[in-house]
Image: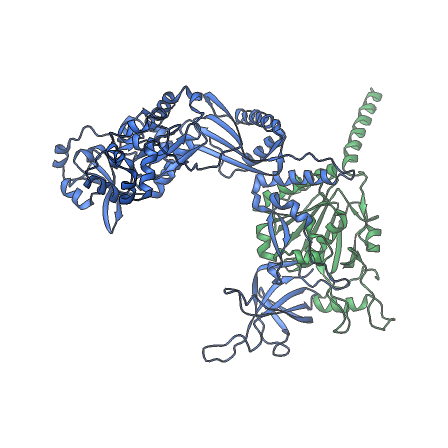
Chain colours: A blue, B green
Amino acid sequence: MVSSTANVAQDENSEEFLNEIARNTDNRLPPPLRGRVGERGKPQALPLPPSPSLALPRKGGGNSAAAQDRPTTSQDDPSVVVTKQNNALQIYALDDAAADLGLEVGLPLANARAICPHLRVFDADQAADAKLLNDIADWCDRFTPLVALDAPHGLFLDITGCAHLFGGEAALMHLLCAALTAQGFAVSGAIAGTAVCARTLRSHAHGRIVRQGAEADAVSPLPVFALGADEAITRGLRRAGLKTIGDVAARERHEITARFGAGFTNLLEQALGQGDAPISPRKPLPDYIVEKRFAEPVATDEVIAATLSRLAQMLVVAMDRQGKGARRLEASFFRTDGAVRTIVVDAGLPVTKSAVIDRLFRERLDALRDPLDPGFGFDLIRLSASRTEIVVQQQHDLDAHVHDNDELAALIDRIAARIGGRRVVVHLPQDSHIPERAAIAAPAQHHLATAVQAIWPVRAESEPPLRPLRLFEKPEPIKVPFAMVPDGPPHHFTWRRANHVVVRVEGPERVAMEWWKPNGERLTRDYFRVEDEAGLRFWIYRDGLYGRELADETGEPIPANWFMHGLFA
Amino acid sequence: MISARTNTLANLRGRIERLEAHGDTHALDRMALGHAAADATLQGGLATGALHEVFAEGRQSGAATGFIAGLAGRVTARRPLVWVRQDFSDIESGALSMSGVAELGLDPRRLVTVRAPDADNALRTAADALACDAVGAVVLEVWGEARQLDLVASRKLTLTAQASGVTCLVLRVAAEPQPSTAETRWIVRAAHSPPGAAWTAWGAPMFDAQLVRNRHGALGQWIMEWKCDECLFSEPAAYPQPVAATPAHRPYQAAAFMADGFEYRERRAG
C-alpha cells in the first residue's frame, strides 16, 4: 500500500498527468512530497501518488533564508497545497522545503504564512487526486488483479501467489517502487501478512517485508499514530502514556475495548497479525486472464491485432478445459508511460471461439471515438474474461431455429460492440395501461431470450389499429381553438405550425393516470383517434377532464391542454 | 487477324454478360403483397434479397412507416426483423410503438431495434445485419437528406442483400429520391378511410402507394389497405353504402381532389 500526501494543484491537467511524467526532464521532476506506501502481507501495498504539482522543481535542502529575502514568490519557494476545513484554509500537503520550515499538515494557512511569507500556495483538487490514484491503481493491475484503494493516498495490492512471477516479494516491491519513483512519485511500501500491518509499516519502515507471524514484533516499536486510527483515539492513547503500538498491545484487550471501542481493537489485532480483514479490490477478479509482456514496447496496429488474436486463442483453450464461454471480455493495454486503457466487449451468448472474440474486439477498436493511442508503445497486453458461463451444448433443431438464434445473437454482439449495447434493443411488454409505458426497450444482448418468449396483449380481431404505430416520447402540444362540444374532440387543430381539419373522429378513450402513486401524473387523458382531410391519422388527447380537473387560483375551471401523442399508419 | 479480333470481342461480350447476369438477370424470389394489381405489375410480388426504397414527405412519416412495416411483415416470414434508425427520427416522427406494431398484426417479439447515432453508423449496421442470413429483413430508416446513402452505398447494400437473401427496405422520410440500385422505389402517402357512416369502422391503414421505379416491370399507383388480421395488403374494402352503381374509385377521387387537387387517373378500380 502506498500512500502519499500529495495533491495535484489545480492548474495541473491531471488527464495529461501520466504523459507529463513520462516527458519530465530533470528540471521538472517533482519534489519528493512526503509519501509513503504501505503494503500488505501476502498482500502488499504500494505506490503513491504524486504530489501536487509535478511542475514544482526539486528544492535543495531547505534554504529558507535566501528565500525569505525575496519579496515575491519564486519556483524555489516552499510549496503547500491547501484545502478548506471548518471554514479555514489548512495545509493539506506540503513539500520537503515546507516541512523543513516546521510546517505540517493541518496547520492553518494563516499560521503558515506567518512562518513563511513567500509560501507558494495551491488549492487542493481532491477529485484529480482520486483520479490519479485510480490511474496508478490501473497501472498496478500489471502486478496483481487484486488492487484496492486506500484513499486518499494509498493502495493495497494482494500479491498472494503473484510475487514469484516477478522474482520474489523483495524484487516485486523494488520493481514497483523504482518504476513509480522514476515517474516522480514519492513512494513507500511494505509487505506484511495483513493489510493493516502493511499500512502501519509503510510510513516508518519503507521496504520492510514481514514474514508470517512476525507482525507483532515489526509494528511494536512504531508510534501509535502509525496505526491510522482516529485522531481522538491517538490523542487518548498518548495521554494514557501509551506511546508505541507495543505499549498498547501489552494492555489487556478488554481495557482497550472499553476505552476506545471494538473498532480500534480490531485494527490493533490486524496490525499485530492476530486477525485479518479482506481488502476490497476495485474490480472483481476475472475468471480467466491471459497476457503478453513485451520486452520492447509495441505500437503498430498489426502487432496489437496479432497479439489479441493469440491471446484470444489462449483464452479459449483455457476456458474450453472447463466448459466455459465468455460473456464479458476486457482487453487492457498497459502503456510504457503508465497509462492503462481497458476496452470491454459484452456478448449475449457465451463466446467459445477465438475468431468471434477477435472480431468483436476489431469492431470495438474500429469504432472507438477516442482511438487507442499507443504513445511510446504498450509493454503489456492483457485479455481477461471477467464474466463467464458454462456453455450448454445444444443440438440444432431440424428447422435450424436454434441455429438462427445463435446467429442473431452473434450479430447483435457485433453491432453492440461497435455502437454500444444500449443502442441495440428488444422490446418487452409491461403491465401498464399508460400508453407510453406499455413496452420497454431492453438491451438485446441480455434480453433476447426473454423477448422471444414474451407474451404480448392480443389485438382485437377485425378492429382497425387502436394504438398508433409511432408514439412521441414526449407528447407535443397542439393548439385547439375550440372543440365540437365542450368535452368532445376538436374541430381542427394546429400541430407543428400546420393546420389540420378533423374529418373523422373516434373517442374518447379515457386513460386515468396512476393517481394512487404519490408522484404519478394526476390528470386524466381523453384520447381521440382522428383523421384529417388529407387522410393522416393522429392520436391526440386532452390532458384533464373538461372543466373538472384544472382550476386557477380563484377556483374557476380553465381549459385543458391538448397534445399530439402518436401517428397511425 | 479478324478471327482473333472476333474472339476477343466474343470474350469481352461474354464477360460483360456474366457481370450483368450477377446484377440483373439474377433470379429473384418474390413474395406476394396481396394486392392483385400491384402483384401483377411486380410480376408476382416484392423481390426478396433486394433493396427497396420508400420515400415520403415529412408529415407522411406515419403512413410510410406503416407501409414499410407491412412490406417487412410480408417478407420476414417469422424471422427476425432488424429495424435500424437514427436517434434523430425518434424526435421528428416518434419512436416505433410496440403496441402499434402488434396492432398491425406484426410480432413485436421478432423485432430488434438499433438506434444508431448517425447515418454512417446506421448504414454500416444495416450492411452488417443484411449479411446475416438468420434475419428476415432489415429496415433502414434515415430521416432527411443523407449524402452517405449514395449510389455506392446502395450498390453495396444490394450486393450484400443478394448474397444473403435478406431483404433490405430503406425508409427515407423528408428526402428526395437519388440515383440508386434499388429494385423498386415507392412514394407513399396516407389515403382516406373509405367513406361511411360515422359509426362504421374506419382507420385501417390505407396507403396511396406510387411505384416510381421498378427495374423489372411497369410502374403504377394504387390505393392499398393493410389487413391487420391477415397480415397482407389488399384492395380497399367495398364501401358499405348501398350505392352500388357508384364507381368504386369515385369517392377517393373526390376526397383526394379536395385534399390536394391530385387526380388518380392511372389508378385501377379496386
Residue located 45% across and 21% down the image: A165
| B112 to the left or right of A270 | right
Q: Residue A266: horizontal and vertical position, in percent?
A: 34, 39
In the image, B181 versus B195, the foreground residue is: B195
Q: Quadrant of residue A23?
A: top left
Q: Residue A36: horizontal and vertical position, in percent?
A: 30, 31
Q: Is residue B176 visible?
A: no
In the image, B24 versus A46, the foreground residue is: A46
Q: Quadrant of the C terminus of chain A?
A: bottom right
User: Does residue A210 lie above or below B126 as drawn?
Assistant: above
User: Does residue A442 lie above or below A202 as drawn?
Assistant: below
User: Does residue B3 lie above or below A469 as drawn?
Assistant: above
Q: Residue A345: horizontal and vertical position, in percent?
A: 55, 37
| A112 to the left or right of B147 | left
Q: Quadrant of the N terminus of chain A?
A: top left
Q: Quadrant of residue B130?
A: top right
Q: Residue B124: horizontal and vertical position, in percent?
A: 62, 40
User: Does residue A453 lie above or below B236 as drawn?
Assistant: above
Q: Is residue A245 visible?
A: yes
Q: Give the mark count.
A: 0
Q: Quadrant of residue A115?
A: top left
